[in-house]
């Protein structure tokens, strides 16, 4: 008795049960196609998956319940070899297409401010909760470790977040 491992997959929005060896061939095929497509053409992978799911549904309705290696190979024959989708992109070409990461900058967070947005801006910069920074700041002010003047200087020196104007429609300004 030949027992094979099966996996549950979702291909093109349709669930399938597939043999492990068929899954590996299918995964390698889709990965190979994806490596040949430019970033704007990545939606083609969804179309390829949808077409393969349609092929599998047609074959499964006729005889079997599990997608096997023979079905995957027939679907690949219908869809075409990965070489037909273009040249394989080298890893350095793919990396050069990605924009370089932007350097983090310290801004006062004007959307989450209590006094001047200094604590929430520092929290955003460090990637922590603003409440934690506020509690630490209050404790340092009362324990003498941080002068209120330092907070005021930071309020003046750290620029406001450029994402939102300070007074977009004068609704925040009370004369």
Image (cartoon, helix red, strand yellow):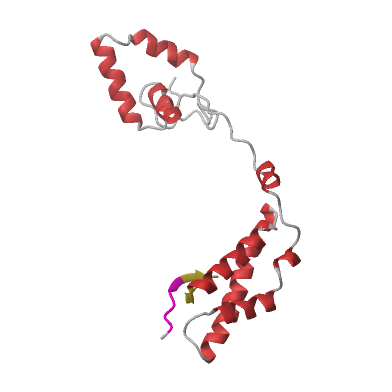
Residue 174 visible in the shown view = yes
Residue at the far left in the pictured view: 143
Residue 43 location, quadrant: bottom right
Rendered-image quadrant of the N terminus: bottom left
Most foreground residue, 13 or 107: 13
Q: Position of residue 103 (x, y in %)?
A: 56, 29
Q: Position of residue 142 (x, y in %)?
A: 24, 12
Q: Which residue is pictured at 56% across the width and 66% down the height?
A: 27
Q: Which residue is pictured at 75% across the width and 61% down the height?
A: 86
Does residue 52 lie above or below 63 as drawn? above
Residue 110 visible in the shown view = no
Residue 151 location, quadrant: top left
Residue at the far bottom in the pictured view: 62
Q: Which residue is pictured at 49% across the width and 88% down the height?
A: 64
Query: For residue 96: magenta?
Result: no
Left or right: where 40 falls relative to 152: right
Left or right: where 82 falls relative to 162: right
Residue 72 location, quadrant: bottom right
Rendered-image quadrant of the C terminus: top left
Q: Position of residue 157 (x, y in %)?
A: 49, 14
Per the rendered image, the range of residues in magenta is 2-8
Residue at the far front in the pictured view: 1
**Number of numbered markers:** 0
Most foreground residue, 167 or 119: 119
């Amino acid at each position: 008795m030949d027992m094979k491992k099966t996996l549950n997959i979702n291909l093109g929005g349709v669930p399938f049960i597939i043999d492990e060896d068929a899954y590996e061939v299918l995964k390698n095929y889709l990965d190979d196609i994806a490596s040949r497509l430019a970033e704007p053409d990545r939606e083609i992978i969804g179309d390829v998956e949808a077409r393969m799911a349609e092929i599998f549904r047609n074959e499964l309705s006729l005889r079997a319940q599990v997608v096997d290696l023979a079905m995957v190979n027939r679907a690949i024959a219908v869809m075409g070899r990965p070489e037909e989708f273009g040249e394989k992109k080298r890893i350095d070409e793919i990396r050069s297409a990605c924009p370089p990461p932007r350097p983090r900058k310290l801004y006062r967070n004007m959307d989450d401010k209590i006094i001047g947005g200094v604590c929430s801006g520092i929290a955003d910069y460090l990637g922590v909760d603003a409440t934690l920074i506020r509690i630490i700041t209050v404790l340092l002010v009362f324990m003498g470790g941080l002068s209120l003047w330092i907070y005021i200087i930071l309020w003046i020196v750290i620029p406001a977040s450029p994402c939102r104007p300070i007074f977009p429609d004068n609704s925040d300004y009370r004369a």
